Image (tube, rainbow, N blue to C red):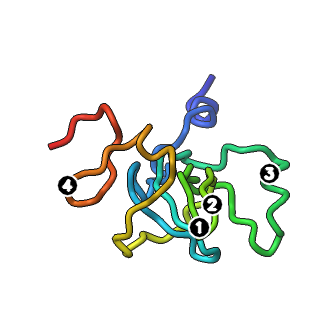
Amino acid sequence: MDLRECKAGILDVTEMKTAKFAIGQVVRHRLFPFRGVVFDVDPEFNNTEEWYEAIPAELRPSKDQPYYHLLAENDETEYIAYVSEQNLLADQSGEPMRHPQLADLFETTADGHYAPKGKARH
């Protein structure tokens, strides 16, 4: 195996995507009226092809970007959402989240932010 063959099988770290949003951060969707707390991040799309194809073609985001798992809510309900980075913005409202699973995964800090349970904080 020569160097070219070896390089072909190794992930080029210069091409790795860095997540813009952090675990515990509150974000909102840029097109739809919901917001959520990030509880996990995939460096790139990691869901089913069926799920991806269900997104209207004109709205379908690229797969080669971070995707976020959110404890999401809108005016009517709470749910889990899977959203591409390009469709998220930092939520600046300061409004607390009401998602029923929030307390299972996060602690609310004195300043109203969300910190993962069981993680050391300073």
Read off the residue under disc 2.
Answer: 77
Q: Quadrant of the N terminus?
A: top right
User: Which mark is nearer the camera, 3 or 2?
Assistant: 2
Read off the residue under disc 4.
Answer: 110
- Return the disc, 1 or 3, that comes first in the chain's sequence: 3
- Return the disc, 4 or 1, that comes first in the chain's sequence: 1
Alpha carbon distance from label 1 to label 2: 6 Å
Q: Residue at x 57, y 61 (%)?
A: 73
- Return the disc, 4 or 2, that comes first in the chain's sequence: 2
Query: Residue 65: x and y, percent?
Result: 58, 57
Q: Is residue 87 visible?
A: no
Alpha carbon distance from label 4 to label 2: 26 Å
Residues marked 1 and 2 touching at CB (< 8 Å):
yes
Q: Residue at x 63, y 66 (%)?
A: 76
Q: Amino acid at mark 3?
A: Trp
Q: Amino acid at mark 4?
A: Ala
Q: Foreground: 64 or 13?
A: 64
Q: Dot 4: few (<14), some (14–19), or many (≥20) neighbours within 10 Å?
A: few
The quarter of the picture where residue 62 lies is bottom right
In the displayed structure image, the side of residue 52 where residue 31 appears, left or right: left
Q: Foreground: 72 or 30?
A: 72
Residues marked 4 and 1 touching at CB (< 8 Å):
no
